[in-house]
Image: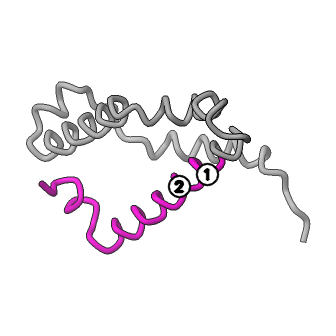
Amino acid sequence: MAHTPTHLHLPKFVAQQQQQQQPAVTVVEMLEDKKTRKLFIACIILQISQQLSGINAVFYYSTTFFDGAIDNPQLGTTIVALVNVIATYVALLMMDKCGRRTLILYR
């Protein structure tokens, strides 16, 4: 069985996706619709929380943070990344067990 390169399938895939696309929805339409309003606001709050938590700065500057504090700053960065992977896996398990909606709306 011959293998066809992926890039040859791309134009066909793009054409199928364009045919299946639904009309674009504006932000105002999402806020006016009661079904999507809570979901939209929850998504915005989650994104803002991630930015304000400073976790992106920790990942970006982790080697600099560890420079001078430990002998091998790259090892510290690797440990931070490993903790992130483990926490992501635990979060996935929680989402499967409890459901995304329950976790987002939990107070």
Secondary structure, mark 1, is: helix
The answer to which of 88 and 73 lies nearer the viewer is 73
Q: Is residue 76 above or below residue 63?
A: below
- Label 2 sits on a secondary structure element that is helix
C-alpha distance separating marks 2 and 1: 6 Å
Say what amino acid the circle numbered 1 marks.
Ile
Query: Badge 1: how crowded within 10 Å, few (<14), some, or many (20+)?
Result: few
Left or right? Give the position of 32 relative to 59.
Answer: left
Q: Please report contact status of discs 2 and 1: CB closer than 8 Å, yes or no.
A: yes
Q: Residues within 10 Å of mark 2 (few under 14, many from 20)?
A: few
Q: Looking at the image, which residue is at 49% across and 43% down?
A: 19
Q: Position of residue 35 (x, y in %)?
A: 13, 47
Q: Which mark is residue 103?
A: none
Query: Can you say which quadrant of the picture contains the N terminus?
Result: bottom right
Q: What range is drawn magenta here?
A: 78-107
Q: Which residue is mark 1?
A: 79
Quadrant location, the C terminus: bottom left
